[in-house]
Amino acid sequence: MVAGFLEPLLADGVARQGSQSGWLAQVRTRALEQLIRDGLPGPRNEAWKYTSLRAIGQRRYARSDPAAATRPIDANLLDLPGVEGPRLVFVNGGFRADLSIIADVPGMELRSLSDVLEAEPDSLREFLSRSFDNAEDAFARLNTVLASDGVVIRVAAGARIVPPVHLVIAGAVAEKELAWQLRCIFDIGEGAALRLVEHHVGENGHGHFGNVLSQLALRANARLDLLQVQNGAETASLTRRTEALLDAGAHLEMRSIEVGAQWMRHDLAVRLNGDRSRFVSRGVFALRGRQHADTRLDIRHSARDTACDIVWRGVADQRARGVFHGAITVESGADGSDAQLSNKNLLLSDQAEIDTQPVLEIHADEVKAAHGATVGQLDEGALFYLRSRGIGPAQARSLLTLAFCRVAFDSIENGVLREYLDALMLERLPQAADGDSQTKSSQ
Amino acid sequence: MLTIDNLHVRVAGKDILKGLSLKVNAGEVHAIMGPNGAGKSTLGNVLAGREGYEVTQGSVVWNGKDLLELEPEERAAEGVFLAFQYPVEIPGVNNTYFLRAALNAQRKRRGEAELDSMQFLKRVREKLAVLHLKDELLHRAVNEGFSGGEKKRNEIFQMALLEPKLAILDETDSGLDIDALKMVADGVNAMRDPARAFVVITHYQRLLDYIVPDFVHVLADGRIVESGDKSLALKLEEHGYSWIAERKLAGAA
């Protein structure tokens, strides 16, 4: 028996869309049974220690938006300056061909999941047969049961795709609050390269619960540059699970900006499965109000000479709460691995809170590993330095805070995009309306 | 221009300045010398408005205003500049951006028009040429990864760009080799002007070979114990600071 959150979502059983292959029906039924058995994780589940599901567990969301195909949405929301190329837009979980720009790019197949499920579901068996046997992965299970749409991008071996693919996941105000599901599959062929932008936006005022499950496969020597800009509505909830599997010599380069959503959880699981595969992650979350954001990294070195290089920054203001869990496991046999993780956080208010937890587990030899995490305040020395040159305290604070966050995206070469991200961050950071109207500080 | 009268300053519960008085007129260069721990850096910091310096007695009047009442950024806009003994590294803040923000914040506060990026860059190029500094400095983050000498030269560059009326140099010579020292001195000398005053705080006489002061003051135990012209610095160099202490004792006896 399920109650609360899951009840209205599971009432009709598994998703019926697409020609249901036997194996797919089995996977979905199994996930459904697991979900009915285990429900949502409780406070004693270690993976949900800092993020309570109590409030969400009591809310009831509609399973889909019947008008998703025609919902009007502000077109300006969908743009990302500096990013021009194929664009795939989903509104309230539904694919919107009318808002998408599907160009014919040689070497790249770009389709909606529902389309592939209809025509050739077996081609996705490697991805869709994934099961989630840990109760902590309740939302991945839910996605497995219900997701009937999403995106499928397959890049042919050796193809190096130049225009960035812009995936827009948007929320629009609807009559009811929804829990929508998206399943995304990215298969980057041997020696191929792709640049992808995962962009979350939303109209303010809706309280939808979004659930995205993404699977990235990087075949030998493939490269994926993934930029995630999570700027969802500050009234919405969003949970994401991103899983990446890297073959020999593959390279995943990620930039993550998390500023939106009232409640956000992102699980990022990367498996360095082939020798010399490499994962680079730069990320930042900047929170205010009562925002809650939980980022959970689970990086596994399973092969020799693999490397991860992770630098994350967090900023919390007002009553916001940030959680960062960075776990790296170097498995037995993954000799010569190099694992680096740094997480620095800034608290801008007495009532803000950030919990950071780096975890390093090593079962191999000749491993280079370093990790560190800090939580602190703005450097008073730097503040005085700026003020002594004439810069007011409010401007000095925002300058220093922005500089702190920039680590996440200052290596982006696209100048227009970088400036947009600068402006996006600046807008989210505390700043006096007028640089001259500052509170007097004591001498 | 600047009148410091009977200034007492306490830092972390300890009295550091104990009745310091000093008058600086426009166009003058004053050197403040003294042994370590005499309160030299405290003087610079209290004039710039750093927190944690408690003024228990005395006053500082700057162009008719009570300087101690002003916030650090207000002092900067009033033309007071402190070249830091230990300039702060600020990763992620571009040097050019920082300088333009600083200059325009000061100008705005003074009711002057802000400079656009073309006007600003023109001014930057002029100053760089005078100081023999490389363009590359501008594209880096503020002081990040700068050598000791580069940091001090960046302070002088900021001073040149901001054109203060009173520049306080806090041990700008410390840690500099002779070439860097000459460059810093050239930068200061190029800015000497009948409308501008300098307070040069130093432990060693060496800098004063290149920046020739109008007055030399000896700061010991929180107050100025001896004042004179540039020959005083040479005497100090010859006899050491103990010479002042002995002379005081002799005078008292």
Image (cartoon, rainbow, N blue to C red):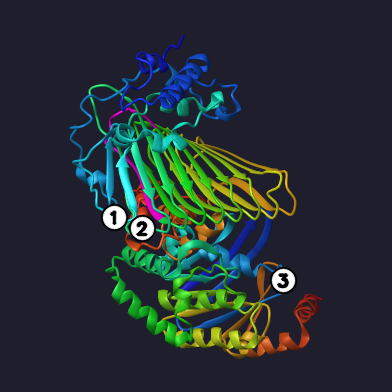
| Spatial separation of the CA atoms under disc 2 and disc 1 | 8 Å
Q: Earlier in the sequence, mark 2 or mark 1?
A: 1
Q: Amino acid at mark 3?
A: Asn
Image coordinates of residue B90 in percent, x first then y, are 52, 62
The numbered dot on residue A161 is 2
Q: Amino acid at mark 1?
A: Val
Nearest-to-viewer mark from 3 and 1: 1
Chain bearing tag 1 is A
Mark 3 Cα-neighbour bin, 10 Å: few <14, some 14–19, many ≥20: few
Q: Are marks 2 and 3 on the same chain?
A: no
Classify residue A3 by image quadrant.
top left
Image coordinates of residue B10 in percent, x first then y, are 64, 57
Q: Residue at x 38, y 65 (%)?
A: B101
Q: Are marks 3 and 1 on the same chain?
A: no
Q: Amino acid at mark 2?
A: Ile
Report the residue marked by disc 1: A105
In reply to whether residue A205 is colored magenta, the answer given is: yes
Image coordinates of residue A63 in percent, x first then y, are 32, 21
User: Which residues are the magenta region?
Assistant: A194-211
Chain bearing tag 2 is A
Classify residue B41 by image quadrant.
bottom right
Residue nearer the viewer, A47 or B186: A47
Report the residue marked by disc 3: B36
Above or below B178: residue A69? above
Residue nearer the viewer, B211 or A246: A246
Pointers 2 and 1 in contact (CB under 8 A)? Answer: yes
